[in-house]
Image (cartoon, helix red, strand yellow):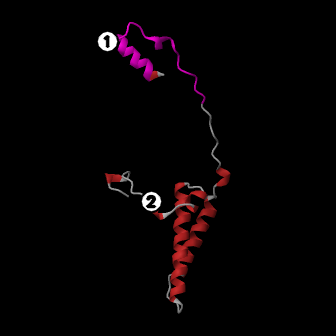
Amino acid sequence: MRVLRAAFTWLTEVRYLAGNPWSVVHDPATVIREVAVQVGRALPARLWTQLRDALDARCARHAVNTEAQDRADAEARQWRTARVAILLMGDSGLRRGEPAYARRENLRATPHAAGGAPV
């Protein structure tokens, strides 16, 4: 509404139009609805710290050399992947369905990093 009113005001001022039909139209009333943050669905800080410590311990424990190196490597990769996914969800606020359906081929570089370099 404001853009149209400003455009017609300008057209009237430069004498392209004889009158401005938008001068009598008022802005519509806007309704601002506040949505309460669902803090009850977030992990408390103490539990989040325990989760991070447990994931770090699992990743460190599977990083040591064992006799069944192939199985240990696969298990270590799984724990590191789980750790990355959980930390990403916690730090970015992703919902559980978003990383569950994420695919590597859907990732694209973004120029929104500091300095304009793609990330």
Mark number, residue 14? 1
Q: Which residue is drawn at 64% across and 50% down?
A: 39
Q: Which residue is drawn at 53% across and 63% down?
A: 87
Residue 27 lies in the magenta stretch? yes
Which of the 4 image quarters holds residue 37?
A: top right
Q: What element carries label 2?
A: loop
Sequence order check: which comes first, mark 1 or mark 2? 1
Q: Relative to 54, does residue 116 appear above or below in the rendering?
A: above
Three-letter amino acid code at the position of disc 1: Val
Name the residue furthest bottom.
67
Coordinates of residue 77 in the picture (x, y in percent): 51, 76
Which is nearer the eye, 12 or 117? 12
Q: Give the range drawn in magenta.
A: 3-31
Q: Mark 2 points at which residue?
A: 107
Three-letter amino acid code at the position of disc 2: Leu
Q: Which residue is drawn at 38% across and 6% down?
A: 18
